Image (cartoon, rainbow, N blue to C red):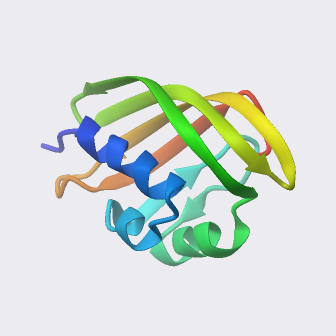
Amino acid sequence: MATADPAVLRSYYEYVDGEAYDDLFGLFAEDVVYHRPGQEPIEGTEAFERFYHEERPIEEGSHEVDALYADGDTAIARGRFTGVLDGEAVAFGFADVHRFDGEGLIAERRTYTDTGRV
């Protein structure tokens, strides 16, 4: 049975904020599916990596995680993001739901934000 690991989520935010993409991609399963508000899912490693390298509208910023919850194969992080989105300074709340596979990798990620532009 898959077990969610909150430490992996802490690493995720550290890696994404530091643009340590090689480390970041190592946290995810090859068949990852990433859901974002109002947009088509990103499916598979190739599309996921392309998103972070070429398509992500966030130019820079940092996540402040207020709470982490884990139960079974699912972990949820709640917090606040501040940074630059499409050339504009932003600050908004987020909740991310991550489902882990049997290898301890993130197989599915869902992002919920106070803005639909992520």
Residue 73 visible (yes or no): yes
Which quadrant would residue 76 be assigned to in this image? top left
Quadrant for residue 42, please give it: bottom right
Residue at horizontal 33 percent and vertical 64 percent from the top: 29
The residue located at (40%, 73%) in the rendering is 22
- Depicted 23 relative to depicted 111: above or below: below
Q: Is residue 118 visible?
A: no
Depicted 91 relative to depicted 88: above or below: above
Instruction: Name the residue rendered at 33%, 23% in the picture.
Output: 69
Residue in view at x 36 percent, y 25 percent = 68
Image vertical order of residue 20 relative to residue 67, above or below: below
The count of marks equals: 0
* Residue 40 percent across, percent down from the top left: 70, 55
78 left or right, relative to 59: left
Q: Position of residue 112 (x, y in %)?
A: 62, 33
- The x, y position of residue 55, in whole percent, is 72, 68
Q: Is residue 40 left or right of residue 45?
A: right
Q: Quadrant of the N terminus?
A: top left
Q: Could you tell me residue 13's position as x and y percent?
A: 45, 46
Report the front residue among 37 and 91.
91
Residue farthest to the left? 1
